[in-house]
Image: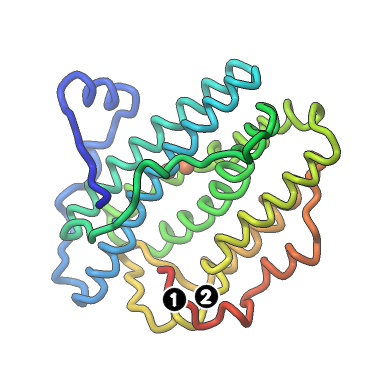
Amino acid sequence: MFELAWRGGATEARLHRRRPGGDALPWGTIDLRRYPALHGIEARRIWSNGVFTEYASAAAFSALTTAMLSCGAPVDLVAACADMVVDELFHVELSARLTMELGGAVPLEFDLAKIAPIASPGARPLLAAAELAITTSCVSESLSVPAMARSRALSDEPLVRAVLDRLVEDEGPHARLGFWFLDWAAPQLEDGELAQLARLAEDTIEVYAPLWQDVRACESCPLPRGLGGHDDLGRQALRRAVEASIAGPLARHGIVLDPARVARLASDAAPSLRGAICSG
Ligand SMILES: [Fe+2]
Ligand SMILES: [Fe+2]
């Protein structure tokens, strides 16, 4: 079961010196009686999942930091990546506190031993770091930017808005880091490796596609808009990000995605996915 531990004392003080302002958010202001019970439950599910994805992002930037050190990436770039691990851990704290204010987490089963992403077996250090940069930053974080911005726009709860403001503020640089790495790494990669990375980017986008293609199931969900849910405009923004924030910038680094596959992935619905389980 996914559970968080907190030490307090010197380590908490150090984190809050590095990431100040968390205590000033409007904690204690959500009146759950204003919402139908189902919305409250859905919000707890969304934010419990949010805590987990922030934790997984910390593991991903941590793995990317180690991979960048292994291929001799620019030191200031590696430092930025390591600092993003701390961003994500601060996001874990804020999301977990918000989840508690919504009534507490719903149970999530996950083997934490498997939380960090791994590169292809046998990939040389430069390629391994490029793989993690693409999956973690260029794809996942690039999709997280519009998703969070839309949740922020839909939310009218001051605490939810304040938490999302802090999260959204950091996501822009998180999505740019992978491209900053490619500025340095791509000229050193061989043509076959660039093609391999393009397939990896397409496969990673495909993993996320149910977020914008799984329309029918979500129409019946009690989306807790005021508590940080999603809608059709959010799905449109995600589809646009596939072309504008991922495929386009990757092509400028010589990582050219298959246009037909990208168009299919960015379409509003894949018939085979219609009616799949709700992804919230
Ligand atoms: Fe985050
Ligand atoms: Fe992030």
Residue on which the image places disc 1: 277
Residue 170 appears in the figure: no
Q: Secondary structure at mark 1?
A: loop
Q: Is residue 220 left or right of residue 81?
A: left
Residue 179 appears in the figure: yes
Identify the amino acid type marked 1: Ile
Q: Please report whichever mark, 1 or 2, sits nearer to the chain's N-terminal start.
A: 2
Callout 1 environment at 10 Å: few (<14), some (14 to 19), or many (20+)? few
Q: Are marks 1 and 2 in contact (CB under 8 Å)?
A: yes
Q: Which quarter of the picture shows residue 181?
A: top right
Identify the amino acid type marked 2: Asp
The residue at 67%/35% (across/down) is 130
**Closer to the observer: label 1 or label 2?**
1
Residue furthest toward the right? 191
The residue at 47%/60% (across/down) is 150
Labelled disc at residue 214: 2
The residue lying toward the viewer, choosing from 165 and 129, is: 129
Here the colouring is rainbow
Position in image of residue 197 (x %, y %) = 72, 44
Q: Is residue 24 above or below residue 95?
A: above
Q: Is residue 260 above or below residue 185?
A: below
Position in image of residue 264 (x %, y %) = 72, 70
Q: Which quarter of the picture shows residue 119?
A: top right
Residue furthest toward the front? 122
Q: CA distance from mark 1 to mark 2?
A: 8 Å
* Pointer 2 residue Cβ closer than 8 Å to ligand 1: no
The residue at 54%/39% (across/down) is 118
Q: How many marks?
A: 2
The residue lying toward the viewer, choosing from 171 and 74, is: 74
Position in image of residue 108 (x %, y %) = 28, 57
Callout 2 environment at 10 Å: few (<14), some (14 to 19), or many (20+)? many
